[in-house]
């Protein structure tokens, strides 16, 4: 089974959104180096030295500038073993490619699809080391 690895919330004003989520939910939010400020990690639970949740079953996520990757709505990221293989399956089942596969820094590949109901889903493939 492929797991949900993160959520992404598009925002118009990063500082306003950061303040809201920190004050309301106590999340720890910080910019991701190399994103130009357009993406901030949102930790909903403590993380380890590899930025992974320390609470079993929990997911962290992020805030991204609205319109990044052409997205305007909240979406989930799912870890898959091969984006290329999943794109074939998704398109065969009536899904649609929104953002082609591309690198995320040097840690992963990422693509965005829409399901048959028009919902965006991020596909995350860890870089094989």
Image: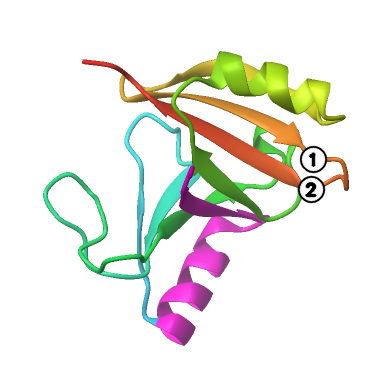
Depth check: give the residue in front, 70 or 108: 108
Residue 79 horizontal/vertical position (percent): 46, 38
Residue 119 marker:
2
Circle 2/circle 1 CB separation < 8 Å:
yes
How far, Cα to Cα, is label 2 from label 1? 5 Å
Please check the rendered image and state whether residue 10 is part of the magenta-colored stretch, yes or no. yes
Q: Magenta segment, which residues?
A: 1-25
**Residue 99, relative to residue 79: is it above or below?**
above
**Residue 126, relative to residue 11: is it above or below?**
above
Specify few, some or many for label 1: CA neighbours under 10 Å numbering under 14, 14-19, or 20 or more: some
Q: Residue at x 20, y 63 (%)?
A: 54
Residue 46 horizontal/vertical position (percent): 22, 67
* Residue found at the far front of this picture: 1
Label 1 sits on a secondary structure element that is: loop
Q: Residue at x 55, y 21 (%)?
A: 83
Q: Residue at x 25, y 51 (%)?
A: 52
Depth check: give the residue in front, 32 or 62: 62
Residue 45 horizontal/vertical position (percent): 29, 70
- The residue beneath circle 1 is 115
Q: Indicate the quadrant containing the C terminus: top left, top right, bottom left or bottom right.
A: top left
Q: Residue at x 76, y 48 (%)?
A: 72
Mark yes or no: residue 37 visible: yes
């Amino acid at each position: 089974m492929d797991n949900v690895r993160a959520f992404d919330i598009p925002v118009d004003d990063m500082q306003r959104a950061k303040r809201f989520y920190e004050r309301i939910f106590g999340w720890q939010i910080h910019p991701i180096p190399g994103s130009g400020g357009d993406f901030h990690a949102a930790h909903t639970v403590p993380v380890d030295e590899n930025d992974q949740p320390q609470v079993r079953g929990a997911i962290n996520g992020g805030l991204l500038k609205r319109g990044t990757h052409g997205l305007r709505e909240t979406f989930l990221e799912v870890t898959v073993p091969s984006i290329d293989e999943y794109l074939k399956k998704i398109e065969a089942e009536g899904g649609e490619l929104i953002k082609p596969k591309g690198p995320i820094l040097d840690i992963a590949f990422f693509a965005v699809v829409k399901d048959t109901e028009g919902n965006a889903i991020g596909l995350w493939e860890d870089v094989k080391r």
